[in-house]
Image: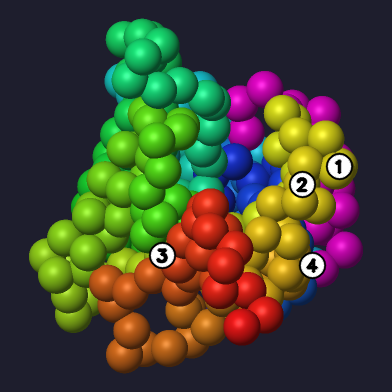
Amino acid sequence: MKNETVLITGSSKRVGRSIAIKLAEEGFNIAIHYNKSGKESHSLQKELKKYNVKVKTFKLDLQKTDRIKFFFRNVLNYFGEISILINNASTFEFDSIKNATIKSYDKHLDVNLKAPFFLSKYFVEARGKKKGNIINILDQRVMNTTPYFTSYTISKSALLTLTRSLALSLAPKIRVNAIAPGPTLKSTRQTKEEFKKQILRTPLKKKVSLEEINNGIIFLLKSETITGQTIVLDSGQNMGWAHTKSIKFIDD
C-alpha cells in the first residue's frame, strides 16, 4: 500500500495529526486538510517531509458544502490519485433539544455528515473501477446514546448508518469502515480532573491512546475482508456502566 495517497480531513491537530504521522511513517502520501489551523498544518507538512513522502496542505471550511467538489478536485489534481479517504474532521459542541438552534444543528450535520457524504461521493467517482478505502471516525456515543450533545450525536449516528450503507453499495470495489473512539484527548471544555474522572468511569479505567487508533486504521486498511464494520476503542465506555447511579452491586 506504500506510495498510495490518503486524504485525511481535520488532520492538522489531535487525532487527525496522529493518523497522518503514522501513515506517513508507513510510506503513504498525505493530503492534509485544515480550516482554521493553518500554522499547525504547515508545521505538520514540514514534519512529514522526513518520511520522503509527498505532502501538501489544503484549506476548506467543511460547512461550505458547495466548495467540497472544488476542494476535492484540487487534491486530486495535485496527487493524481487518492486511494484512501479518512473522514476525521468533526464539530463537537454542546446542545440539547432544549437549547439547540438551527445554526447549531446545521453546523454539526454539515461538517460531521454532509461533508463526509459528498467527499465519499467524489472519491468514488475518482476511483472509477479501482479499489479504495473509506474510514469514518465516529464516537463511542453512537453505541451509547445519552441526552447530551444532541446534534453531535445525531450527526455521528447518521455517519455510522452511512458507513454501513456505503459498504453495501460500494462493494466489492471499495471497503467502508469506521473507528469509534472513547476518551482519548481532553476536550477544550474539560479540566484535567474532569477528563481523569471520565476515564476512571470506564470499565477498563484506561485512556484510549492515539497509537491504538492509528493501529486500528492500519488494521482496517490491511484487512481485505472487512467492510461495514466499526471498531470501538473506548475502554468499554459504550456499554453504559459508567452512567449507572446504583452502586449496590459493587464488591458483591
Q: Are marks 2 and 1 in contact (CB under 8 Å)?
A: yes
Answer left or right for 245 relative to 235.
left
Amino acid type, label 3: Ala
Amino acid type, label 1: Lys
Upstream in sequence: badge 3 or badge 4: 4
Q: Residue at x 64, y 51 (%)?
A: 16
| Callout 3: SS | strand
Q: Which residue is mark 1?
A: 192
Q: Is residue 172 above or below residue 47?
A: below
- Residue 206 image point, x, y percent: 74, 69
Q: Which residue is mark 2?
A: 195
Q: Which segment is the magenta one?
A: 34-51
* Residue 144 lies within the magenta run: no
Q: Are marks 1 and 3 in contact (CB under 8 Å)?
A: no
Cα distance in 3D space between marks 1 and 3: 28 Å
Q: Quadrant of residue 34?
A: top right
Q: Is residue 189 above or below residue 84?
A: above
Amino acid type, label 4: Asn
Checking the image for residue 178, the label placed there is 3
Cα distance in 3D space between marks 2 and 1: 5 Å
* Residue 47 lies within the magenta run: yes
| Callout 2: SS | helix
